Amino acid sequence: MESVGPHVVPAATADLAELADVAARTFPLACPPSATADNIAAFVAENLSADRFADYLTDPDRVVLIARDDARILGYAMLIRGVPDDADVQRAVTLRPAIELSKMYVLPESHGSGASSALMTEALTMARDTGYRCVWLGVNQDNRRAQRFYAKHRFAVTGTKTFRLGAGVENDFVMVCPL
């Protein structure tokens, strides 16, 4: 029987090469026009390689989910337990315990497939079922499309923070979804 839509499962070692490819293809799409190609490439090389994803899969503070159809990965999400020591984030995320939705990207040709909603639903369910009081994230202030998507899932802007992108610094909104 053929599946009806995307399904979400934890990423596995067998997914590493494809996951890194999806990450490298999708991350630049969320970057603001002011981000340089060099800064984007540096971030991808440092954070989104198959080796880095292998590290993420063994990190007890991280969960990597993938949305797939029968043949391929359509997108992924990464959750990181806790709130960093960053003062801006500490002020913006007041509910504890908290978990960060650090990354959530879907291939452009899979927009509208239900993959994004499936990833978000699974991330929020996992967070709630494991005792978190909120999910938080940072989203570039110029990424209106992502902000609208997050708002549909009950995230609200609670503050701002900076995000290091290669040699550049970007400005993000902090958004929080109470559970």
Image (spheres, rainbow, N blue to C red):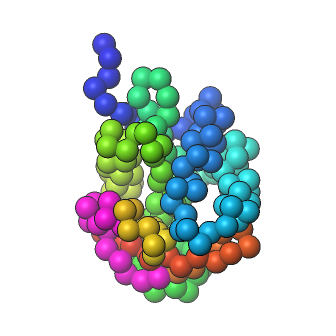
User: Horizontal and vertical percent for residue 149?
Assistant: 32, 60
For the magenta stretch, what is the residue range? 147-160
Task: Work out whether residue 158 or residue 58 is closer to the camera in this orientation and state it.
Answer: 158
| Left/right of residue 78 with respect to residue 169 in the rendered view | left
Q: Find residue 156 and report its image quarter.
A: bottom left
Which residue is at 70% across, 46% downward? 49
Residue 167, can we see it? yes
Asked if residue 176 lies in the magenta stretch, the reply is no
User: Horizontal and vertical percent for residue 93?
Assistant: 42, 78
Name the quadrant of the C terminus.
Answer: bottom left
Q: Find residue 167 and report its image quarter.
A: bottom right
As drawn, which residue projects farthest toward the top? 1
Residue 108 position (above or below residue 43): above
As drawn, which residue projects farthest toward the front? 33
| Left/right of residue 31 with respect to residue 173 in the rendered view | right
Name the quadrant of the N terminus.
Answer: top left
User: Horizontal and vertical percent for residue 60?
Assistant: 59, 52
Task: Work out whether residue 117 or residue 110 is closer to the camera in this orientation and state it.
Answer: 110
Which residue is at 68% across, 61% downward? 37
Which residue is at 37% across, 44% downward? 111
Asked if residue 153 lies in the magenta stretch, the reply is yes
| Left/right of residue 48 with respect to residue 109 in the rendered view | right
Which residue is at 37% across, 62% downward? 145
Residue 150, can we see it? no
User: Horizontal and vertical percent for residue 87?
Assistant: 55, 86
